[in-house]
Image: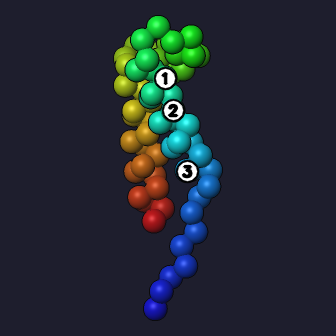
């Protein structure tokens, strides 16, 4: 039997958003990086940690 799987569109949206934030954080001198998690936290890997968390959440729900 095949199961019908449903994707969580919100989860995909936030994973894509976090990937864009990671790209913006790696652009040196970007004006957009002033509004990301990088400017409010102590370390540089906050967006990556959020991405890994969302990936684990997606795996757990599957």
Q: Which mark is residue 5?
A: none
3 vs 2, front mark: 2
Asked if residue 5 is positioned above or below residue 31 in the image, the reply reads below
- Within-10-Å neighbours for mark 3: few <14, some 14–19, many 20+: some
| Vertical arrangement, residue 11 with respect to residue 60, above or below | above
* Residue 55 at x, y percent in the picture: 42, 49
Residue at x 49%, y 23% (from the top left corner): 24
| Along the viewing direction, whichever of 51 and 21 lies nearer the viewer | 21
Label 2, on which residue? 20
Q: Of label 3 and label 2, which has the lower sequence position?
A: 3
- Secondary element under disc 3, as helix, strand or loop, is helix
Q: Earlier in the sequence, mark 1 or mark 3?
A: 3
Q: In the image, residue 1 lies at what x, y percent?
A: 46, 91
Of all residues shown, which one is farthest toward the right?
10
Q: Tag 1's secondary structure? A: helix
Spatial separation of the CA atoms under disc 3 and disc 2:
12 Å
Are the residues tagged 1 and 3 within 8 Å (C-beta)? no
Q: Could one spot residue 2 in this view of the protein?
A: yes
Q: Which disc, if any, is residue 24?
A: 1
Quadrant of the rendered structure where residue 52 is?
A: top left
Please give the residue where the numbered disc 3 appears in the rendered image. 12
How far apart in space, not on screen, are marks 1 and 3 (Cα)? 19 Å
Quadrant for the C terminus in the image: bottom left
Which element carries disc 2, helix, strand or loop? helix
Q: Nearer the viewer, residue 17 or 57?
A: 17
Residue 40 visible at all: no
Which residue is pictured at 51% across the width and 43% down the height? 15
């Amino acid at each position: 039997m095949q199961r019908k799987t449903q994707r969580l569109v919100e989860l995909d949206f936030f994973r894509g958003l976090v990937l864009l934030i990671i790209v913006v954080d790696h652009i040196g001198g970007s004006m957009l990086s002033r509004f990301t998690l990088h400017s409010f936290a102590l370390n540089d890997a906050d967006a990556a940690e959020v991405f890994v968390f969302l990936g684990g959440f997606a795996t757990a729900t599957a």
